[in-house]
Amino acid sequence: MAEEIIDLTSGLYRFLVAGEATVMAGRRAAQGARERFLEHARHLSERFREARRDAGERLSFRLEEIATSLGRLAVELDARCTRAGSAAETWTSLGQQYEALLHHLRRRRLAVPRGTELDHIKPRNYARNIFHVSMGLGAILIYELFFSRAQMILLGASLLGLFVVMDILRRTSGRWNDRLVKSVFGAISRPGEAFRVPSATWYTAALLLGAVFFSQHGVELGALVLALGDPVASLAGKRWGRIKLIGQKSWAGSGAFVAVSFLASATFLFVMIPGVGLARASAVGMALAVVGGLTELLSRRVDDNLSIPLAVGLVATLLVA
């Protein structure tokens, strides 16, 4: 039974990764692609309903919930469906249900066969991308124009403390967790963040550690690379990322990350740091972009909102006097 549930969960993961463009396009999607997607949704729905018969009560509820959402999604994407946005709403719910099932399986510490795809999903979210860029650039502006190092450390520690308290509270209250993830931060949260430390917490921890251990320009460059490179990599990977490198990371996404990070870093070095000429700014900017790109590519067990600013910030501190 455990192997069947893992296989089903992996199938749902592949369905969610591959089907996002079809759902977002709705009736504008190509007829053949939409028909294949609908058939896949109905088939998965039947498989989940069959599996729930032999599952325990709690798991059975989750499987039935997913089966119902898959069936509803197929109906809403049918040509007869008229309510705008209904399929997108069901798609969002399905992502949350998948993450809940994945969390359940990981808590049970089930052995996952080699080669089985099971990971957190990262749906396209422009509001999150804008927030991501704004948080990084805002931190740079505050540090550059207004706050001293001691004040930045105090600000970072205060924000991190607030986020940690919120995370502890939501782990002790399902209602508080739902309110935070779906209502307060609903526009910018990912489905899996209901069950793990949110990216904003890791982002704040990285900026705090950078302010403590790195030079001012080092932590600013780490924040800059993450703020611009990561969202661009996500958007490019979803649009053009057919050739994969590791997991869902693609050549297109990684290439976009390095290109944008290089341009941003080189410009920052040339404009903001006296005495850094164009040649040195370009060389150091490329080094930081490559370090950031490799860190983003290889950060599977560590959140890249923590690893990228720290890796880039360290290298920038060493290379920039």
Image (spheres, helix red, strand yellow):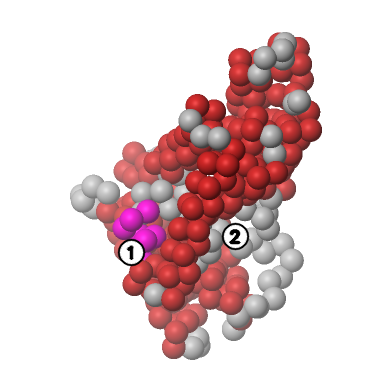
- The numbered dot on residue 36 is none
Which residue, given by chain and number where applicable, does mark 2 sit on?
Answer: 119
How would you rate the neighbour count of disc 1 (Cα within 10 Å): few for under 14, some for 14-19, many for 20 or more?
some
Is 102 or 200 nearer to us in this picture? 200
Q: Is residue 175 left or right of residue 52?
A: left
Cα–Cα span, label 1 and label 2: 24 Å
Residue 105 in the image: above or below residue 247: below
Quarter location, residue 106:
bottom right
Question: Can residue 261 be seen from the camera position used here?
Answer: yes
Which residue, given by chain and number where applicable, does mark 1 sit on?
Answer: 179
Is 5 or 193 nearer to us in this picture? 193
Residue found 43% across the figure and 40% down from its top: 131
Residue 286 magenta: no
Residue found 61% across the figure and 15% down from its top: 271
Assign a secondary structure to mark 2.
Answer: loop
Residue 196 percent location from the top left of the image = 53, 64
Residue found 57% across the figure and 45% down from its top: 153
Boundaries of the magenta span: 178-185
**Residue kind at label 1, given as amino acid type:** Arg
